[in-house]
Image (cartoon, helix red, strand yellow):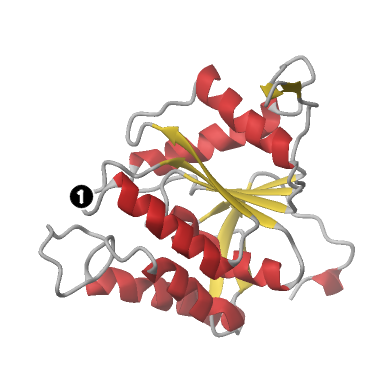
Amino acid sequence: MKLDILAFGAHPDDVELGCSGTIAKEISLGKKVGIIDLTRGELGTRGTAQTRDEEATDAAKILGVSIRENLNFRDGFFVNDETHQLEIIKMIRKYQPEIVLCNAIADRHIDHEKGSKLVSDACFLSGLSKIETEFNGEKQMHYRPKLVYHYIQWQTIEPDFVVDVSEFMDVKMKAVKAYKSQFYNPNSNEPNTPITSKNFLDSIEYRAMDLGRLVGVAFAEGFNVERYLTVNSLGDLK
């Protein structure tokens, strides 16, 4: 299956928190979108890897993505090396996305920055014909996505562009809240973490509101680019 957009996250819920409004919007426009999680989030303070698997499945249904897979890298300990790059290259060549979305270029959680560089490097290497890979016993053709964008996560980074997600903020929040074990629950008996507070859950909306305010819309999601954006004319800019 060829996808238009393939979103990678170091952990289940990274994509939902960072760019699920954009994903929901692109799907509404007829685009085929997939999600690949690098780890199962097994080091998360709350819940278990199985819990996260179930929550990720629920969130994928809410968003309406075409596929969701997990590469089962070690949470907290995966590295940007040949072994991990090749696994991502296989996914890029399998789905041949025009656009890849990946973790923030810098962030509080070490896996986010590692995942960002790992996926970005794999996107480039995937286009080299002398790197040979197989999937299900068949040789894969080399393929490089046209565009790689990095969504913004915990750390406040100035975006290079934003996407108006005003009509899809409710879908984003439903997808985020599918991770019931991870976020604010006043009845939970599990330990508190920086992401379990009500303030964190509220921040998802108020940060999107602030980005929206800056461009004159209700809600927006921000992204960073790896190369200059190109437009056909000044009228393409809003």
Within 10 Å of the Cα at label 1, are there few (<14), some (14-19), or many (20+) other Cα atoms? Answer: few
Residue 153 seen: no
Quadrant location, the C terminus: bottom right
| Amino acid beneath label 1 | Thr
Residue at image x 23%, y 64%? 196
Query: Residue 213: x and y, percent?
Result: 52, 82
Q: Quadrant of residue 23?
A: bottom right
Judging by the rendered image, the residue that carries numbered circle 1 is: 45
Q: Secondary structure at mark 1?
A: loop
On the image, the x and y values in percent for residue 100 come to 65, 47
Relative to the observer, which residue lies in front, 211 or 69?
69
Q: How many marks?
A: 1
Single out the residue that lies furthest toward the right.
232
Vertical arrangement, residue 215 with respect to residue 72, above or below: below
5 sits to left or right of 119: right
Instruction: Give the residue at x 55% y 85%.
Output: 218
Q: Is residue 228 in sight in this rendering?
A: yes
Quadrant housing residue 90: top right
x, y (%) of residue 157?
46, 57
Q: Left or right of 123: which side holds 55? A: left
Is 55 or 145 nearer to us in this picture? 55
Q: Is residue 16 left or right of residue 130?
A: left
| Nearer to me, 54 or 5 | 54
The residue at 71%/36% (across/down) is 94
Q: Residue at x 40, y 29 (%)?
A: 78
Residue 230 coordinates in the image, percent (x, y): 80, 55
